[in-house]
Image (cartoon, rainbow, N blue to C red):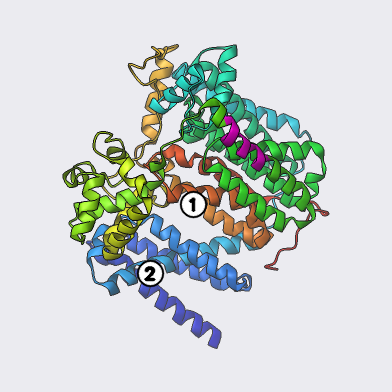
């Protein structure tokens, strides 16, 4: 009886806090439908939690992670700047109530995961469903290809196309990707050849992924759902016809993640096969060489794997050593031999630049010396004219007045002045940071806002005379209409990388509940990649986080993987 009274009191208190917190940004208060539905959902959730209270036994670390994830999820959907104008108590109440609201819903999901039985299904023919799904995905990519033949190319794409034809390399684009382009155009000198190669790579990696699902006896209903999502959600396929390094890199991130899952579910025995060692090496090589931030992602992941899979540490470190040495040789002697021009080091200063700009534009606190210093970097009037809260491009591409050389003559002085103005203006610096990195964490954007989603044509008036060829006017028109519709409400969330991050976080907790903490090693490449983008994001460009899209469906399936008897890993939550 006493337990029921305590539970009832907690329910009422939470309900009051939630309702009060949710009404802080509502013009109509309790009359708002969303507030009423929120309260109703809380009541239903508490009834569910009480009836399943036996499943609420989690480790302390799980509770901490669940609370953190709940805060991140509610923050991702935060879009009300008016709350920031209220007093500190109201702001704290607002965030606390929303976090509790998401926490309760999150706990319901995790209890469902904990009490659910396994979903394994014995396939009579493993190869047939995999081939059918892969063929469907390949044809889906071809629809976009024929609609925007021979390819979609931005100025970035054309710059790498030029390198592949002239042999004048710039480390702005990973040289390994440029070498692949050079090899392909020897067979067929057309952007269409690159696109065909990308479609084959994407399709084969999906083939590999679905083959993993089927071998692990994932239910066909779930596989059908995944296939439908891939075929109908543009970000999964349309990028295969755009010539960007991000497509190969993101596909190999999925490939790499699947291989780590192979190692995990086999307790390391998967690496005993020479074929599997080569497959792991291939996926790790792509991650390390297809985009610059991929190399640290690969290094940190493999060092962690060497610790988690200690019985296989020699094989893991051998692969690590080979790729590490190869990278140093290529970026050292090979770069010197080929006279590879270095990439712009200013790319790493995107977030500091945005924070400085916001402080200057908002008339923040700067000493005379600091103002004079930043005026030499970029004239004060131009800081105010060029600043865009969501992209660093207008400032960094002001070649005639933004003085890179002045910055890098004394980089320590730059960071000294930068840190000084950030310390003096924490609110403005935080505001700039949140807006610049919103691509990573924000599902519901502040206004005004923009995200570079996709392109469907070759950049006009390029020096190569490349143009799109309309194979079927009807197909091109319908494909464009479909893509445009996907960017409008209620589908526009699919063009927010943070939406996929929220999905991954929720299912990561489910994976933790069902498989134990050690299973989180599978998520490490995604987490490290996302963090690497977060710390140096130059603009709101969807392709920077395309890997999160590819990986998201794989993470959804992982909690439902049934290990074979000899593969089972002890769940630390049980």
The numbered dot on residue 382 is none
Q: Nearer the viewer, residue 252 or 115?
A: 252
Q: What quarter of the picture does the C terminus occupy?
A: bottom right
Q: Which residue is mark 1?
A: 531
Q: Earlier in the sequence, mark 1 or mark 2?
A: 2
Looking at the image, residue 313 sits to the left or right of residue 446; the answer is right
> Pointer 1 and pointer 2: residues touching (CB < 8 Å)?
no
Q: Quadrant of residue 488?
A: top left
The answer to whether residue 110 is above or below residue 389 is: below
User: Circle 2 sits in a helix, a strand or a loop, which is it?
Assistant: helix
Q: Quadrant of residue 35?
A: bottom left
Going 23% across and 46% down the picture, which residue do you hit?
376
Give the main secondary structure, helix, strand or loop, of the magenta stretch. helix
Looking at the image, residue 383 sits to the left or right of residue 426; the answer is left
3D distance between C-alphas at marks 1 and 2: 27 Å
Looking at the image, residue 522 sits to the left or right of residue 107; the answer is right
The answer to whether residue 22 is above or below residue 226 is: below
Going 20% across and 51% down the picture, which residue do you hit?
361
Going 36% across and 75% down the picture, which residue do you hit?
16
Looking at the rendering, the stretch of residues picked out in magenta corresponds to 323-334
Residue 200 in picture, x, y percent from top left:
61, 25
Q: Nearer the viewer, residue 334 or 144?
A: 334
Going 37% across and 32% down the picture, which residue do you hit?
485
Q: Nearer the viewer, residue 370 or 287?
A: 370
Numbered circles on residues, count = 2
Furthest residue in direction bottom, as rendered? 2
The numbered dot on residue 97 is 2
Q: In this orientation, does residue 112 appear? A: yes
Q: What quarter of the picture does the N terminus occupy?
A: bottom right
Q: Quadrant of residue 364?
A: bottom left
């Amino acid at each position: 009886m006493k337990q029921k009274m305590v539970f009832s009191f907690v329910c009422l208190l939470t309900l009051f806090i939630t309702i009060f917190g949710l009404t802080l940004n509502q013009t109509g208060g309790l009359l708002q439908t969303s507030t009423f539905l929120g309260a109703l959902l809380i009541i239903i959730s508490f009834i569910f939690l009480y009836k399943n209270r036996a499943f609420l036994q989690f480790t302390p670390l799980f509770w901490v992670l669940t609370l953190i994830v709940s805060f991140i999820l509610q923050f991702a959907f935060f879009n009300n700047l008016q709350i920031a104008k209220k007093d500190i108590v109201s702001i704290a109440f607002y965030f606390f109530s929303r976090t509790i609201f998401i926490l309760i819903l999150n706990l319901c999901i995790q209890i469902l995961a904990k009490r659910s039985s396994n979903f394994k299904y014995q396939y009579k023919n493993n190869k047939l469903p995999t081939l059918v799904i892969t063929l469907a995905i390949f044809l889906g990519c071809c629809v976009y290809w024929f609609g925007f033949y021979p390819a979609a190319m931005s100025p970035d794409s054309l710059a790498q196309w030029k390198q592949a034809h002239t042999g004048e390399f710039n480390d702005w684009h990973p040289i390994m990707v440029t070498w692949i382009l050079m090899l392909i155009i020897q067979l067929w000198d057309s952007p269409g050849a690159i696109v065909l190669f990308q479609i084959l790579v994407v399709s084969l990696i999906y083939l590999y992924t679905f083959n993993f699902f089927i071998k692990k006896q994932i239910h066909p209903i779930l596989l059908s759902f995944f296939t439908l999502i891939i075929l109908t959600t543009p970000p999964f396929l349309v990028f295969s016809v755009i010539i960007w390094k991000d497509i190969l890199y993101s596909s190999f991130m999925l490939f790499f993640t699947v291989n780590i899952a192979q190692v995990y579910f086999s307790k390391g025995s998967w690496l005993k096969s020479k074929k599997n060692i080569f497959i792991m090496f291939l996926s790790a090589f792509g991650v390390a060489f297809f985009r610059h931030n991929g190399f640290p992602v690969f290094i940190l992941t493999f060092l962690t794997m060497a610790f988690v899979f200690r019985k296989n540490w020699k094989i893991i470190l051998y692969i690590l050593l080979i790729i590490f040495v190869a990278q140093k040789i290529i970026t050292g002697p090979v770069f010197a031999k080929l006279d590879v021009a270095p990439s712009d080091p200013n790319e790493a200063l995107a977030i500091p630049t945005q924070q400085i700009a916001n402080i200057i534009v908002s008339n923040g606190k700067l000493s005379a010396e600091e103002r004079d210093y930043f005026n030499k970097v970029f004239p004060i009037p131009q800081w105010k004219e060029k600043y865009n809260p969501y992209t660093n491009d207008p400032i960094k591409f002001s070649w005639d007045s933004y003085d890179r050389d002045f910055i890098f003559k004394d980089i320590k002085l730059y960071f000294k002045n930068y840190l000084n103005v950030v310390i003096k203006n924490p609110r403005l610096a935080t505001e700039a940071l949140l807006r610049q990195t919103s691509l990573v964490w924000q599902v519901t954007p502040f206004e005004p806002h923009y995200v570079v989603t996709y392109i469907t044509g070759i950049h006009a008036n390029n020096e190569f005379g490349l143009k799109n060829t309309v194979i079927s006017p009807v197909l091109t028109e319908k494909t464009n209409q479909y893509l445009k519709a996907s960017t409008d409400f209620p589908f526009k969330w699919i063009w927010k990388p943070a939406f996929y991050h929220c999905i991954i976080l929720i299912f990561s907790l489910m994976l933790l509940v069902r498989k134990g903490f050690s299973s989180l090693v599978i998520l490490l490449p995604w987490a490290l990649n996302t963090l690497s983008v977060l710390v140096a994001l130059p603009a709101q460009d969807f392709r920077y986080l395309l890997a999160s899209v590819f990986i998201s469906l794989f993470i959804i399936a992982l909690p439902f993987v049934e290990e074979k008897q000899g593969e089972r890993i002890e769940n630390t939550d049980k």
